[in-house]
Amino acid sequence: MGSAEMNNRLEALENWAAGLLGQLEPASRNKLARSVGQALRRSQQHRIIAQQNPDGTKYAPRMQRNLRGKQGRVMRKVKMFKKLRTASFLKVQADGNATSVGFTGRIARIARVHQYGLRDRAERGGPDVAYEKRELLGFTDADIDLIRDDLLKNLIS
């Protein structure tokens, strides 16, 4: 799905939900925002575990380099972003007006480099490396459906 089409779906969802959310008490809105944020974080975590961009394509593979002294050892394929997907790094911030899911602090810089495919140093004093674009955060069709369903579930109950 193109970004323009995704933006249209997000705007339609926002317009649909605005009237309903305006009728809620502030405490209920805060609870709902936290619930939606946590559901979105779980969705993003599952996508990172599956090593997939929001459009369903696989992440670009890691650059391989030969390390001296590693002959004869079996190198396991370790998935990328194993720690970044944990709740201690992937934070949810929610109040009655907004919900956000993202990275903070030092980790945010690392995530931004991968999200947009920027250049960075892998280690202090090392050479600049151009990283492949790996979208850690982003909306899928399922995420928009998840938000809508979570809103409905919380508004009805």
Image (tube, helix red, strand yellow):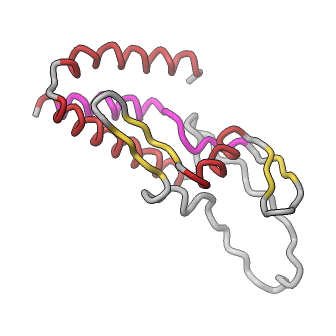
Residue 77: give x, y in percent of width and height: 67, 68
Seen at 29% across and 41% down, the residue is 34
* Vertical order, 87 against 10 (above or below): below
Image: 15 above or below 128 = above
The span shown in magenta is 133-154
Closest to the observer, 154 or 104: 104
Q: Nearer the viewer, residue 100 or 78?
A: 100
Going by the image, does 70 lie left or right of 154?
Answer: right
Residue 48: image x %, image y %?
Answer: 54, 51
Q: Mainly helix, strand or loop, the magenta region?
A: helix
Q: Which residue is at the far left?
A: 157
Residue positioned 63% across, 59% down in the render? 80
Left or right position of 129 against 157: right
Magenta region includes residue 144: yes
Q: Nearer the viewer, residue 108 or 71?
A: 108
Find residue 56 and report its image quarter.
Answer: top right
Percent coordinates x, y for residue 95 in the rendering:
31, 35
Quarter holding residue 157: top left
User: Where residue 109 sits in the image (x, y, percent)?
Assistant: 65, 48
Vertical order, 73 against 25 (above or below)? below
Q: Residue at x 16, y 19 (%)?
A: 23
Identified at 79% across, 50% down, the residue is 120
The relative height of residue 70 versus residue 149 in the rendered view (above or below) is below
The answer to whether residue 117 is magenta is: no
Position of the N terminus by quadrant: top right
Specify whether 51 is left or right of 92.
right
Total labels: the figure holds 0
